[in-house]
Image (cartoon, grey):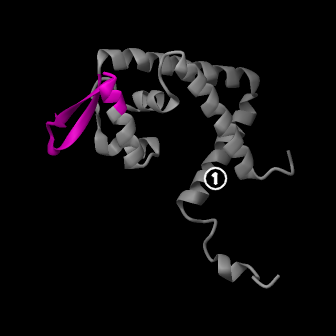
Amino acid sequence: MKDKTIDYVLRTTWLTVQKMYNEEASKFESTMATGFTLLSIDPEEGTPSTSLGPKMGMEATSLSRILKTMETRGLIERKPNPEDGRGVLIYLTDFGREKRGYSRDRVLKFNEAIRKNVPLEKLITFYEVADTINDLISNKKIYTNEVNNTNINR
């Protein structure tokens, strides 16, 4: 493990998790992206379409395609935002709520399995490391002043 870079471990672990979720989602004629979207929409109040992308960490174009597919499948419906005439709220249909339940169940089962197999101290450290990585990236603390700190002629 010591020869693997941090980004390699993150990437391969995420790809494994993604594959697992997609395999589970396919049993319910869905995808991981659809499940994640269903879980990100407030089941009672709906969610403004403009806040959904940032909430999920997705680009607007990718999210638009997912939402269009979900609307075609009858999982969501779009309604004008009564507080902002220019905005749209995304609501779950009854079918969307049903599929959301499957997604929620799978996420909770995954978390339960990890918690049963990883000691609490290690999970706490994992979350701390993830927070540090996110902070370093979000606040652009990794590649700043790179030219000044590196000898290019080495």
- The image shows residue 36 at horizontal and vertical percentages of 47, 31
Q: Residue 144 or 27: which is nearer the viewer?
A: 27
- Secondary structure found at label 1: helix
Q: Is residue 100 left or right of residue 126?
A: left
Specify start and end residues of the magenta stretch as a single range.
69-92
Q: Quadrant of residue 121?
A: top right
- Was residue 77 drawn as part of the magenta stretch in this picture? yes
What residue sits 70% from the left and 51% below the top? 7
Q: Residue 125 or 32: which is nearer the viewer?
A: 32
- The image shows residue 61 at horizontal and vertical percentages of 38, 48
> What amino acid is found at the position of numbered circle 1 in the picture?
Ile
Q: What number of labels is visible?
A: 1
**Quadrant where the image shows the C terminus:** bottom right
What residue sits 69% from the left and 25% below the top? 114
Q: Residue 105 or 99: which is nearer the viewer?
A: 99
What residue sits 61% from the left and 59% below the top? 136
Name the residue tied to disc 1: 133
What residue sits 31% from the left and 21% below the top? 74
Q: Quadrant of residue 9?
A: top right
- The image shows residue 128 at horizontal and vertical percentages of 66, 45
**Quadrant where the image shows the N terminus:** top right
Relative height, residue 126 to residue 116 (above, below): below
Q: Quadrant of residue 149?
A: bottom right
Instruction: Please identify the residue farthest to the right as the structure is shown.
Output: 2
Give the prevailing secondary structure in the magenta stretch.
strand
- Was residue 137 drawn as part of the magenta stretch in this picture? no
Q: Is residue 106 left or right of residue 44?
A: right
Relative height, residue 67 to residue 145 (above, below): above
